[in-house]
Image (cartoon, rainbow, N blue to C red):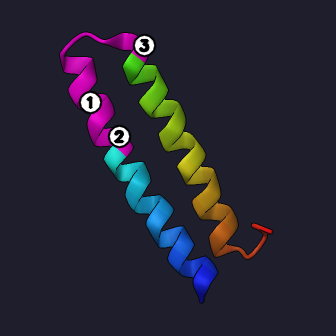
Amino acid sequence: MERNLFGLFTALLGVICVLCAMQSFQKRRYGLTAFFMLNAFTNLVNTIHAVYNTLF
């Protein structure tokens, strides 16, 4: 149960990171955009691991 909640939380953080990346891309801050997209990808990987119970 707690792993699924962690997966939901990291998915929500991934969505927030993508929204922040779009906003920083519009302001032409490409380094910050790359940072947010890398963080969103990491959150996606953590979400997959949490859902399939291979996190820890």
Which residue is at the front of the view, 6 or 19?
A: 6
- What is the three-letter code of the residue carrying label 1? Met
What segment carries the magenta color?
17-31
Q: Distance between the residues labelled 2 and 3?
A: 14 Å
Tag 3: Cα neighbours inside 10 Å, few (<14), some, or many (≥20)? Answer: few
Quadrant housing the C terminus? bottom right
Vertical position of residue 41 compared to residue 4: above or below: above
- Whether residues under marks 3 and 1 lie with C-beta atoms below 8 angstroms apart, the answer is no
Nearer the N terminus, badge 3 or badge 1? 1
Quadrant housing the N terminus? bottom right
Which residue is at the front of the view, 27 or 48?
A: 27
Residue 36 x, y percent position in the rendering: 43, 32
**How many callouts does the rendering have?**
3
Residue 38 x, y percent position in the rendering: 53, 32
Q: In the drawing, does residue 11 fall left or right of residue 38?
A: left
Vertical position of residue 49 compared to residue 24: above or below: below
Residue 30 counted in the magenta span = yes
Q: Is disc 2 placed on a helix, strand or loop?
A: helix
Tag 1: Cα neighbours inside 10 Å, few (<14), some, or many (≥20)? Answer: some
Residue 31 marker: 3
The residue labelled by disc 2 is: 18
The residue labelled by disc 1 is: 22
- Whether residues under marks 1 and 2 lie with C-beta atoms below 8 angstroms apart, the answer is yes
- Whether residues under marks 2 and 3 lie with C-beta atoms below 8 angstroms apart, the answer is no
- What is the three-letter code of the residue carrying label 2? Val
Q: Is disc 1 placed on a helix, strand or loop?
A: helix
Q: Is disc 3 placed on a helix, strand or loop?
A: helix
Q: Magenta stretch mostly in which secondary structure? A: helix
Vertical position of residue 9 compared to residue 25: above or below: below
Q: In the drawing, does residue 11 fall left or right of residue 17?
A: right
Residue 54 marker: none
